[in-house]
Image (cartoon, rainbow, N blue to C red):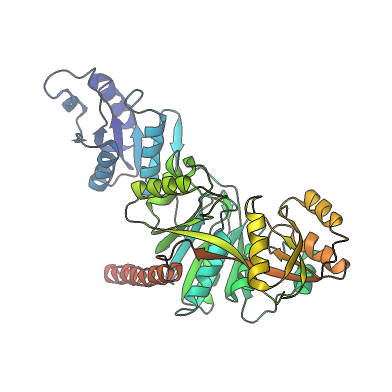
Amino acid sequence: MQRAIVLIDGEHYPQVTAEALRQISADFDVVGAVCLGGTEKLACGSPLEVLGVPIVMGLDQLQAVEQAIALYQPHRVIDLSDEPVLDYPKRFAIAARVLALGVTYSGADFVFTAAANTVSTSKPSISIIGTGKRVGKTGISGFAARTLSREFSPIVVTLGRGGPAEPEVVYGHQVDITAGYLLSLSVQGRHASSDHLENALTSHVTTIGGRRCGGGLAGQAYVSNVDRCAAVADAIPGNIVLFEGSGSAIPSVATDRRILVVSAHQPLDTVAQYLGPLRIINSHLVVLTMCEEPIASEHSIRAMEDAIRTINPRARVMRTIFRPRPLSDIRGKSVILCTTSSDAALPIMASHLEEAFGCSVVASTNRLSNRSALQADLASFGGRGAHLVLTELKAAAVDVVTSWGMANELEVAYMDNEPLPAGAEYSLQEEILALAREAVEQHGRIHSAASCVD
């Protein structure tokens, strides 16, 4: 029988709570309770003794729940509390904390299931997850892979909504990923802009493409082939594995370290409310992207940092901005730029390309993820005298942009979105290398302990 602890309050008569515990005991071994506050229905003395279980009380609500979980090691936390002791924000804060500790949280009419991190790998590993789509997760993943290549032989596993049904290995240092190669994949009906191809193109590392469908409130995918991807990663050369999430979905892998990517222009509720804190609590490094005007104000960036540090004071938080990095020479050329960026970021990208790479951006679109609008934009660019179309490898970059460029006898080039520190005191490279070394140490400790048990 699974162990459970219950959350109670003093707004219920203890005898009523005791009756609820008797019913719960038919399905669970109730090993403790947490009194979250409220005194209206409590008489003098120790009326809660009628419950017949040890009780944690007198602490901050989140601290009390954490202490009870540490003491009693339950499989489930069952919430018998109610308004006004627990309002909706407090209840979600508890849910995030409980789920982050790997425990299921349920109540009268809800169940939040803890992540089943049943997938493991024989190699040290880092997960790179995000708080949504278009936060720059793949840009950070590619940068991490290039950085780790200094000391390690990294493998990147991606789980896209358009990824392959069976794990697909691309040896980025061996395969020449050209426009023609990508277009040939697209003609075959494959998703030629899949994240594993982007990582292989931008970082020249070994990548494994997988897929997932659905994303729960706590970040779990409904269907995923990450287990088979992990098995492939174990079998091929490489000594550290990066598991890249998809959107806000989290790979169900017990990784040694975790990087969280948050866009500074997202609503603060993304990290501070609902189940947003869940992703922060277990993260070791939080990378804030797009930390610049007019994309995000200094006030909103600081509010995001403060919220993250309040939720997880141990996490390292770094500000970054993105700048385009062409993967081929575009100097002296007239360029059509195609991105998925925001309206605010598009002119910043164009200006950087002109200043840093000596080209002339004669037209641009940020509607790479809207095929019909993108096609309309490209049709309007016909008379701009461009030599080259430069695109991110995302969304419709191959089946629309690459196809259009080649049909119009333009060069087709791809670019990376490279994270740069938004402040002289930051070194994202050093942070990533330090995190990888920690992952190696943690992996070694876990496997040494497992060997001793065996």
Considering depth in this image, is 259 or 305 the residue closer to the camera? 305
Quarter in which the C terminus is drawn: bottom left
Q: Which quadrant of the figure has residue 365?
A: bottom right
Residue ID at (58%, 75%): 206
**Residue 407 in the image: above or below residue 132:** below
Residue 447 place in picture, x, y as percent: 34, 70
Residue ID at (61%, 80%): 173
Seen in the image, is 51 located left or right of residue 429? left
**Residue 424 in the image: above or below residue 261:** below
Q: Is residue 73 visible?
A: yes
Residue 381 place in picture, x, y as percent: 84, 58
Seen in the image, is 404 located left or right of residue 425? right
Q: Which quadrant of the figure has residue 318?
A: bottom left
Q: Is residue 194 visible?
A: no
Residue 160 place in picture, x, y as percent: 62, 58
Considering depth in this image, is 67 or 406 the residue closer to the camera? 406
**Residue 308 in the image: above or below residue 175:** above
Residue ID at (36%, 23%): 83
Quarter in which the N terminus is drawn: top left
Q: Which quadrant of the figure has residue 98?
A: top left
Seen in the image, is 124 located left or right of residue 414? left
